[in-house]
Image: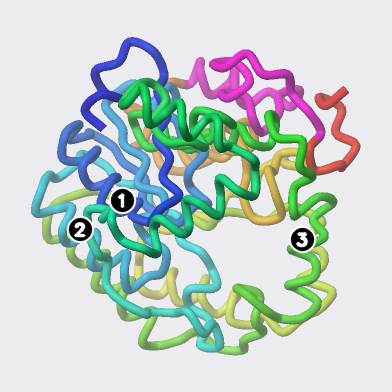
Amino acid sequence: MRLQLASPESCLFSEYGKQNEAFYKFELYRAIRPDIAVIGSSRVLEMNQREFTRPFVNLGRVMTDIKRGESAVVQLLNIHKPKFILIGIDQYWFNPNWDEAGVDKVKLVRADHNDPRAILRLMTFIAEHGLWLEAWRALQRGPECHFGISAKKFLSGYDAHGYRHNGHFLTSAKTPEDAKFAFTLHKIATGDRRFEPGHNVSDSQFAYLVKMTKALEEAGVPYLIYFQPYPPKIQAAMDQRGGFEYLEELKSRLSSANMHFFEPAFIHSDCDYIDGFHIGDAGGARQLAALTEEDPRLREFIDMGEIRKVGATSNSPMFYSAEIFHLKPADFLRLGCRWGH
């Protein structure tokens, strides 16, 4: 992390031995002490420091459910109080039938590189992608930009402010699992893995959100809660299948609780996504513009010139990776996107 922050070029960090993003993101937060931050799951990782005029940290993957998020916010406030925080919440966190909900509080554990599970995970990744030569070179050379074998080989990893580059979509010959949104559409059809049907909001899970916002208000930290949208094709499949009544109840409860909440309504297409679940750079920039228009408190933090440049409808969801690492845009999801030709 220190090497990343000190480097004059964009250096990426990735680790496949153990999922310890929370520890890494907390260290970034502690070092940068940002004026503005975004916290959420992997669905907020498209926000980039270049879109902000003030110090920023992307805390995506710190809040993988609302219970972890509530405990993370309390710990973050003990380290540093930002001037504003964006909170991207995933709708399924409040579904009582989501079986991963509230499994534990956020854990800030440094990776143990002697952990057999970490070694096995790394060796499996190396074997699957035939990266033996890259691994040997990394062992010989030691720390250098980029950090981690996936960052070196595929340009996939976190930058020095927590933004996630997904270079593997442009550098790997492997067809993505969610090409044509097939994997996500299957989950919707089977009601599985975040797309479980649900009628009512979970009271226990909603209580964690109430505790989170109360902690922010007591600390005097302004915030804005927002929903990350799904691709139009995915939303249409959800509407057709039905059984997601808890979503409307969730919006109603957010309003009744007088929380600072906004669901952006903006023009986006399937081609703005990197898969059926995660929006990319161009669509994310337009979403940030919509959030700023809704909440004037954000204006002092946002670089609208950068937002307009990145958010052009002719841009791909991989705008920053393509620009920084000189990668050619590609229609990796096989959606027939214009910018991929």
Query: What amino acid does circle 3 point to?
Result: Ile
Q: CA distance from mark 1 to mark 2?
A: 8 Å
User: Where in the figure is residue 107, as x and y percent of width and height?
Assistant: 25, 64
Q: Magenta region: which residues?
A: 304-331
User: Where in the figure is residue 293, as x and y percent of width and height?
Assistant: 49, 36
Crowding around mark 2 (Cα neighbors within 10 Å: few <14, some 14 to 19, many 20+) is some
SS category of the residue bearing label 3: helix
Q: Which residue is under mark 1?
A: 223
Q: Which residue is under mark 2?
A: 216
Q: CA distance from mark 2 to mark 3?
A: 33 Å
Crowding around mark 1 (Cα neighbors within 10 Å: few <14, some 14 to 19, many 20+) is many
User: Who is closer to the viewer here, 162 or 218?
Assistant: 162
- Relative to 162, residue 185 above or below: below
Q: CA distance from mark 3 to mark 1?
A: 28 Å
Query: What amino acid does circle 1 point to?
Result: Tyr
- The reply to whether dot 1 and dot 2 touch (C-beta < 8 Å) is yes
